[in-house]
Image (cartoon, grey):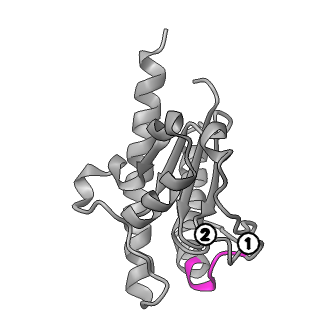
Amino acid sequence: MSQRHILFFCMGNICRSPTAEGVMRAKLQAAGLADTVEVDSAGTHGYHAGEPPDERAQAHALRRGYDLSAQRARPLVAQDFTRFDLVLGMDADNIARAERLCPPAERHRLKLLLDFAPGAGKRHVPDPYYGGDAGFEEVLDLVEAACDGLIDTLRAQAASRP
């Protein structure tokens, strides 16, 4: 499989997108694909730049074996749309904001994360920031399903290339 570059993004880059980055890293490692796929995360708003993921997001992720502690928030920038093959947003508002930064020729890279989890019954990963524990668990459930689907897609793409 040739090197792939995937960026996950949400609003502040402290809950959903760092969770997706951490889950994807672990799943790529387990699938033997960690050397072939680069992952990162960003936020459409830069007000948490340099901060670690939300403590609740870290705690819930760690209970499932995902360590998010080394990550730091950063803003989504226009160059991300040429650097990354896939730029995956968590909800429609995130996508709308990203479209303002994205060069028109690169819009094909921009998708919803849950496009890779059609069986999830949702199109958007809800923001757990103002909710309780159940919100962080739902994010993990949805992100795990989407990351599994994304790995299946990457494998299928690699198999179809000459």
* Residue 53 lies in the magenta stretch: yes
* Residues packed near mark 1 inside 10 Å, few (<14), some (14 to 19) or many (20 plus): some
* Residues packed near mark 2 inside 10 Å, few (<14), some (14 to 19) or many (20 plus): many
Q: How many marks?
A: 2
The mark that comes first in sequence, 1 or 2, is 2
Pinpoint residue 86: horizontal percent, then vertical percent: 52, 41
Reply above or below: 140 against 95.
Answer: below
Which mark is on residue 49? 1
Kind of residue indicated by mark 2:
Asn
Pinpoint residue 75: horizontal percent, then vertical percent: 67, 63
Please state the extent of the stretch shown in magenta in the rendering: 52-57
Residue at the disc numbered 2: 13
Tell me the quarter of the picture where residue 96 sits: bottom left
* Residue 137 lies in the magenta stretch: no
Give whichever of 125, 79 is nearer the camera.
79
Pinpoint residue 71: horizontal percent, then vertical percent: 72, 66
